[in-house]
Image (tube, rainbow, N blue to C red):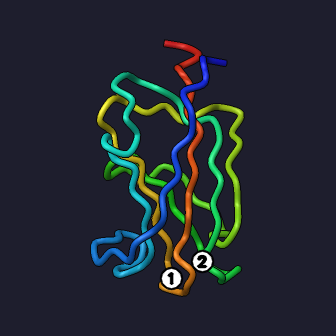
């Protein structure tokens, strides 16, 4: 496991350009949000909201679909293999609903364990 780089949390916005569901909730972590200038890994993700157990959530790296979960209302991702993120890459979470409340996502970052 690489050195801990902290966590970032962000609330969702309704996004017309959401590729999973136009106008649905989205949380996007950009370079300005992440503030890590080198490659890193996301070793844990925590998700809360919207209040609809049947909603789904997709994770994208830039414009590339990466993963999905059938429970977008409350969930976590604790992978056996952390998610590699390149410098400047955007980490996107997209929901297929507009039901309130807006979602909150927290990502937990570490230095890469293998380069």
The residue drawn where x is 56% and y is 36% is: 42
Categorize mark 1 by other alpha carbons within 10 Å: few (<14), some (14-19), many (20+): many
The residue drawn where x is 66% and y is 69% is: 70
Categorize mark 2 by other alpha carbons within 10 Å: few (<14), some (14-19), many (20+): many
Q: Residue furthest bottom?
A: 99
Residue 2 quadrant: top right
Placement of 54 over or under 9, stated as above or below: below
Callout 2 touching callout 1 (CB < 8 Å): yes
Name the mark on residue 42.
none
- Mark closest to the chain's N terminus, 2 or 1: 2
Relative placement, left or right, of 53 versus 17 is right
Secondary-structure class at tag 1: loop
Residue corresponding to mark 2:
50
Secondary-structure class at tag 2: loop
The residue drawn where x is 65% and y is 53% is: 46
The residue drawn where x is 49% and y is 78% is: 96
Task: Name the quarter where the N terminus is drawn.
Answer: top right
Residue 58 position, x and y percent, is 51, 62
Which residue occupies the foreground of this view, 31 or 115? Answer: 31
Residue corresponding to mark 1:
97
Residue 114 quadrant: top right
């Amino acid at each position: 496991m690489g050195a801990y780089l902290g966590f970032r949390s962000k609330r969702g916005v309704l996004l017309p350009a959401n590729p999973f569901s136009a106008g649905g909730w989205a949380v996007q972590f950009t370079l300005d949000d992440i503030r890590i200038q080198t490659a890193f890994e996301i070793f844990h993700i925590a998700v809360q909201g919207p209040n609809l157990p049947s909603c789904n959530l997709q994770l994208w790296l830039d414009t590339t679909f990466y993963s999905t979960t059938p429970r977008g209302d409350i969930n976590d991702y604790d992978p056996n293999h952390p998610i590699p993120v390149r410098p400047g890459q955007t980490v996107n979470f997209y929901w297929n609903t507009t039901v309130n409340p807006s979602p909150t996502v927290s990502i937990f970052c570490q230095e890469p364990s293998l380069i």
